[in-house]
Image: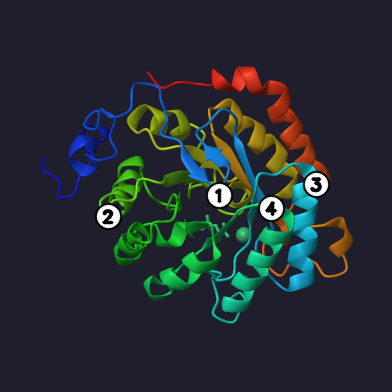
Amino acid sequence: MKIAGRVAVDDLPRICPLLSRRTNPRFGEAQTRVVQVGSVRFGGESPVVIAGPCAVENREQTLEVAREVKGSGADMLRGGAYKPRTSPHDFQGLGLEGLKILREASRETGLPVVTEVMDPRLVEQVAEYADMLQIGSRNMQNYPLLIEVGRARKPVLLKRGMAAGLCEWLGAAEYIANEGNFDIVLCERGIKAFSNGEYSRYSLDLNVIPAVKAETFLPVIADPSHATGVAGMVEGASRAALEFGAQGLIIEVTSDRLDASKPKCDAAQAISPGTLRRIIHYIDARQEQLVAAVHAA
Ligand code: PEP
Ligand code: MN
């Protein structure tokens, strides 16, 4: 039977000739093309840990969490200034003011900052303040946005669409590469499966990590926070993703000192700086074994 739009992994050389290992031989087998953000190296010697609040809520909260994640050993700071929310009545982020707060937190801690851009018209603005541009799960197939970040000449963190297959995800990355920007880091952030909020938010697709590494030379990291939606699952999900070969993690953290004012979004998945420290210790202790993580045949 012929089906319009049917794709298989064997089609990747046609879908993404710039990013497929099979068609772009610039990078040898099992090798990752390192994506550099300041002094941070994705796909380098050691997994990269990005941590911070879900959203930039105000200056005090962001600086407090930034100091905590720096103290715990994180490599980069995260935080949303423009938030994709289910309801237009929910907190939408501080916008430009949030970007300025992130810049200040980055300056103070020395941590490079990644933040989401949702609107092609705002790519230039966000790129002025961020060290890395995040494309969120809901926008993975927003092609005008992908083209715009491809032209921005800034590293891009491309989250997997929550209902996207591997070919769709790599096809989306190809839009960015097609504009000449190969500084792309992929992020598995949980997919729609059977959890449906009954026992977790999404389902962390560990298996896709070695598959990505088999098909492309782009680094791939995992987001255990959105994948599970449960703070108590984040440490285990982080370890599992690392064992499956994830080259980094992006984790939502809150500060114990901010308990009075719980995070405005995704509070149930925010871990404490102490838990973040344990995850980073795990990386340090497992360093040598993690290099030899799962490989897809
Ligand atoms: C986020 O990282 O802030 C976020 C909204 O994640 P996702 O796009 O994966 O839902
Ligand atoms: Mn969040």
Counting residues from the N terminus, which is met first, the one under dot 1 or under dot 4?
A: 4
Q: CA distance from mark 1 to mark 4?
A: 33 Å
| Type of amino acid at the residue the image marks with label 4 | Gly
Instruction: Tell which tag, 1 or 4, sits nearer the viewer.
Output: 4
Q: Residue at x 73, y 49 (%)?
A: 231
Is 49 rendered above or below residue 216?
A: below
Counting residues from the N terminus, which is met first, the one under dot 3 or under dot 4?
A: 3
Residue 291 screen position, x and y as percent: 56, 21
Is 113 rendered above or below residue 221?
A: below
Circle 2 residue: 179
Q: CA distance from mark 4 to mark 2?
A: 30 Å
Q: Is mark 3 within 8 Å of ligand 2?
A: no
Q: Residue at x 60, y 30 (%)?
A: 46
Instruction: Tell which tag, 3 or 1, sits nearer the viewer.
Output: 3
Q: What quarter of the picture does the C terminus occupy?
A: top left
| Type of amino acid at the residue the image marks with label 1 | Tyr
Q: Is residue 95 visible?
A: no
Residues under numbered marks 4 and 2 in contact, where contact means CB atoms less than 8 Å apart: no
Counting residues from the N terminus, which is met first, the one under dot 2 or under dot 3?
A: 3
Q: Which mark is residue 202?
A: 1
Residues under numbered marks 3 and 1 in contact, where contact means CB atoms less than 8 Å apart: no
Instruction: Tell which tag, 1 or 2, sits nearer the viewer.
Output: 2
Counting residues from the N terminus, which is met first, the one under dot 1 or under dot 2?
A: 2
Residue 240 screen position, x and y as percent: 62, 31
Residues under numbered marks 2 and 3 in contact, where contact means CB atoms less than 8 Å apart: no
Q: Which mark is residue 110?
A: 4
